[in-house]
Amino acid sequence: MKSKYGLLSVFFLALISCSSDTPTEEVPTTITVESLTVQGSDITTGTTTQLAVVVKPDNANDKSIVWKSSDTSVANVSNEGLVTATKNGSVTLTATAKDQGTVQASKTIIISSFTPEAPKADFTVNSTAELLVALNTVKAGQIIEVNEGTYPITTRINITTSGLSDKKITIRGIEGKGRPKLDFSAMSEGSSNQGIVLKADYWYFKGIDIFHAGDNGMQITGSNNTIEFMTFSECADSGLQLDNGAANNLILNCDSFFNADSSLENADGFACKLTAGSGNKFVGCRAWQNLDDGWDGYLRGTDNITTTYENCWAVKNGYLKTGSKGEGDGNGFKTGGSDDKLLKHNAKYTNCIAAGNVADGFDHNSNRGDVTLYNCSAYDNGRNYSFSATNPLNKLIIKNCNTLGAYGTTLATTVETTHNSWLIGTTVTASDFKSVDYTELLAARKADGSLPDVNFFKLNANSNMIDKGTDVGLPFKGAAPDLGAFEF
């Protein structure tokens, strides 16, 4: 008789044998996201930008992303990473790996494509009476907006309330509408009949026309003011004058024209003169057909001040509105001068143009200071550059300048005149330029107030004045600066 244990052994052996023939089932491995990198760019134009995410490792099972914006009032982000902006600002977009919900990466983008809204006005002016009330009651940091139209004014406006460096007082025309015109033609001609006397500091004027004042259209005796995109016309003295200590004022993209007194021998376009302070700057301004000078820097009562001029154009000064000659000096830029012929008005001109003026394009007038001209142009003036040995400048620097015709005289106690068109060994002709028609310089300004695009005195491709300048710290293209006010 066989043992029952023997039968059991056989059974278990058979069972083991059967088990060993069955394959073992492997459990699948899950590969999770370990890191994310968000890529994208700032929004400088338009309103959208597409973000991308680099997922590591590449073979992660679930690469799907959940997006979040730190500030939905600035920008939203879609499930696909498309960012849609609603206003300027900074926003952080965060990507989270969906598999575990713990791995994240962020990207901060700057949005600057929206035109900033102008601060709301504290005063909106529709009449002369409302304008005068606003000017008498405005405070630091406040804004006066003046609607389009003509505002007859019979007496001088004195402004004595100052703003602050971080809270300027603003008076402006309303953007997108016609310009307001302050009409002082009811005033008689007289030395006290300026249109506006700005005796205060930290004002910002923009987009207003000043017409037919009995003396200066605007006289500035305060400091740290900005006068932008204004016009001054048909006044009985200089359209805009800085004196009585006025310092560090910026005159930007302004025009002054047809200013003349009844004696037909006075009135400049712009004047930083007599007792003016230092640090005043003219940028992108034009002066044309003013009876006396385009710019006058004559001093009386102050000394050793500095004024700068950038991209300014002086055209046909010394001629009246009718086109006939007056009895004034007729210079484009009069750098200085004084009664005793001893005072110093230091001046720096860059990319300035003097064309068609009755007398000198750039004039010395016994100024005893330091004068620098970089990349300036002069054409068809009585004398193009006139810096003589009589009561000479202390120092004269002229570099990268050009002219068509005789250049004039360039003398001083110390002289640095190099790399100018009359020194390069070739004759300058009209064929060097795209145009020699300086009436182009009087075309309408662009909508933002900047100077018009012109062909006048821009160099042709075959001009010998290309790359003939020297580096004076101004931007240029090519191997070296070109000569004159415009780079080819």
Image (cartoon, rainbow, N blue to C red):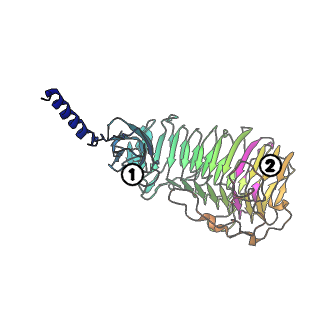
Q: Is residue 184 left or right of residue 304?
A: left
- Asked if 164 appears above or below 452 in the picture, the reply is above
To which quarter of the image does residue 360 belong? bottom right
Q: Secondary structure at mark 1?
A: loop
- Residue 289 part of the magenta-drawn span: no
Give the residue at x 25% y 38%.
17
The tag on residue 108 is none
Position in image of residue 56 (x %, y %): 43, 42
Residue 341 visible from this viewpoint:
yes
Q: Which residues are magenta?
A: 334-362
- Asked if 363 appears above or below 135 in the picture, the reply is below
Residue nearer the viewer, 296 or 94: 94
Which residue is disc 1 drawn over?
A: 127
Which residue is disc 2 drawn over?
A: 397
Q: Secondary structure at mark 2?
A: strand
Disc 2 residue crowd, few under 14, some 14–19, many 20+, Cα 10 Å: some
Q: Name the quadrant of the N terminus.
A: top left
Residue nearer the viewer, 90 or 157: 90
Q: Amino acid at mark 2?
A: Ile
Q: Is residue 285 left or right of residue 416?
A: left
